[in-house]
Image: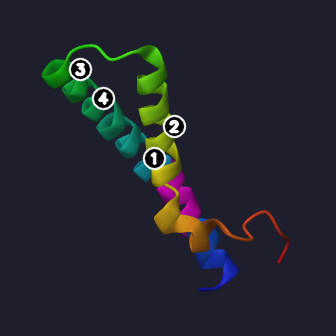
Amino acid sequence: MDLKARKRWSLVILLVGLPIYIVVAVTLVNLMDRLLGRQPILLELAVYVGLGILWILPFRRVFSGIGKGE
């Protein structure tokens, strides 16, 4: 994939995909609260950090080299 296409895809991923993923992550944590009760704040933080890292793994190749010049 050329640099121009990766820049476009990264913009789509950040503007459309990331907000959707944030809603899904918050919904999952709320579901966890409903099913298991309120968890300690450090566990919730660990879940959010884990989900925050997890979303980027499939898109590593799209985001690599985006900040470099053509």
On the image, the x and y values in percent for residue 30 come to 25, 24
Kindly identify which numbered label has been placed on residue 57. Answer: none
The span shown in magenta is 9-14
Local packing at callout 1 (Cα closer than 10 Å; few below 14, some 14-19, many 20+) is: some
Residue 29 is drawn in which quadrant? top left
Q: Quadrant of the N terminus?
A: bottom right
Compared to 13, does 70 lie above or below?
A: below
What residue sits right under mark 1 in the picture?
18
| Circle 3 Cα neighbour tier, 10 Å, few/some/many (<14 / 14–19 / ≥20) | few
**Real-space Cα separation, disc 4 to disc 2, in angstroms:** 12 Å
Cβ atoms at labels 3 and 4 below 8 Å apart: yes
Q: Are marks 3 and 2 in contact (CB under 8 Å)?
A: no
| Most foreground residue, 29 or 67 | 29
Circle 4 residue: 29
- Mark found first going from the N terminus, 1 or 3: 1
Main secondary-structure element of the magenta-colored stretch: helix
Q: Quadrant of the C terminus?
A: bottom right
